[in-house]
Amino acid sequence: MRTLKFTGNSYEIGRELEEHYREWHQDLPTDINRRTLSRQLAIYRKHFPSLIEEIRGMADEATGEGSYEKLLYSVLAHGVDNMRVRPPETKGCTIFGVKTPSGLIVGRNYDWIPQARDAFHIYNMNITGRYSYTGISDMNIYKRRHASHKHWSFSAEDTINEKGLYIGLTFAHNPRFGYGLSSTHMIRLIAETCATVDEALKVFRKVPLMIAKNFFVADASGNMAIVEHNSKIFKVLRPDERGILIQTNHYLAPELAREDFCLKECPAHDTYVRYYEALCGINRAGKDFNATYAHKILRKSPYIYANDPDGFMTIWSLVLDMTAKHYHLVFDTASCERTMEILP
């Protein structure tokens, strides 16, 4: 795990990022689908123009003929064409939120292939005119054979910004896709521009999403919501009457549950077990639930904490006291479990 910091305007951030990508000998696509790029560029120019300026900075720092167009396609459009030929790799992940007398506690496990334990980064992004945020990223490792540096990119699956807004994602079993922002760009746009859950939901209402995903959003006021998205429509879920909200990898909204592929593709998937194991852990704690109980559920339950060297492993865990703004990242080293405080 590495910790990095980026500071400057969008163009300067792009140059800083490219310094790392050049060091890692990042691969860029050799074939560009200009029709896809044109459709995606129109969406990003409308909804996330600062990212295009960042890519311009990357291109000016890069070497090689046609770097700007290749980078535009790689960052904004290649994901659409990838989805045409192969669906994304199945992932795990669990996120829950519990309202307590002292405030909102959020717990999160990010589960992925073992190689991600060595690759994941935590980085602080301070872009002029935007909210600063801390991102945690598996560096875009999407297959065991694509775990080398040349495939890495700073694409955060979890962010916490200076206003106390958290947003993270979980995998959705739905092959739908279309033109729109990638899931990690959606997270980044919300982290940079939103202070509350309600503001984040406004972004989902106006900005198209490329791929089906689930998002968990929580803020410092104690508000939280799940956004279940199939890339065409989305549904918002709120906490139950006890102030509990849980998301694993299956759709909970009835309209989307009808098109969930989980039981068709992975009938033995543990998403349902993890959901109810989290609920049972929260129920057992009752009114005593706090950050310590959240840590116990995430790290001690054999159903929620993944540790299979031939399958999924828990790459990192988050224990977030949203009200007190105390944020902790928990991860494993070769010899022990480590905890570090996150400062957005």
Image (spheres, rainbow, N blue to C red):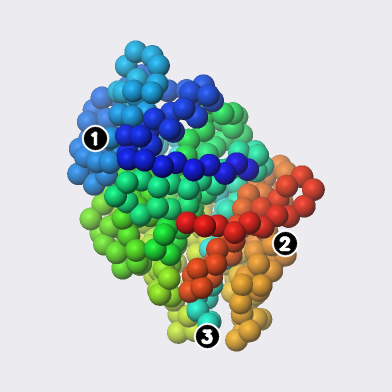
Residue occupying the point 21% across, 40% down: 45
Mark 3, Cα crowd under 10 Å, few <14 / some 14-19 / many 20+, is few
Q: Position of residue 342 (x, y in %)?
A: 55, 57
On the image, the x and y values in percent for residue 1 come to: 63, 43
Question: Which residue bears the numbered disc 2?
Answer: 302
Q: Is residue 77 left or right of residue 341?
A: left
Indicate the secondary structure of the residue bearing disc 1: helix
Between label 2 and label 1, give the one nearer the viewer. Answer: 1
Given the image, on which type of amino acid does mark 3 rest? Pro
- Residue 38: quadrant of the picture: top left
Q: Residues within 10 Å of mark 1 (few under 14, many from 20)?
A: many
**Quick one: label 1 or label 3, which is nearer the N terminus?**
1
Q: Give the residue displayed 49% in from the left and 43% down from the top.
A: 5
Q: Position of residue 4 (x, y in %)?
A: 53, 42
Q: For marks 3 and 2, give the one nearer the viewer.
A: 3
Q: Secondary structure at mark 3?
A: loop
Instruction: Tell me which amino acid carries mark 1.
Output: Leu
Q: Amino acid at mark 2?
A: Pro
User: Closer to us: mark 1 or mark 3?
Assistant: 3
N-terminal label among 3 and 2: 3
Question: Which residue is the site of mark 3?
Answer: 101
Q: CA distance from mark 1 to mark 3?
A: 46 Å
Asked whether residue 231 is in view, the answer is no
Residue marked by disc 1 = 41
Closer-to-camera residue (210/53):
53
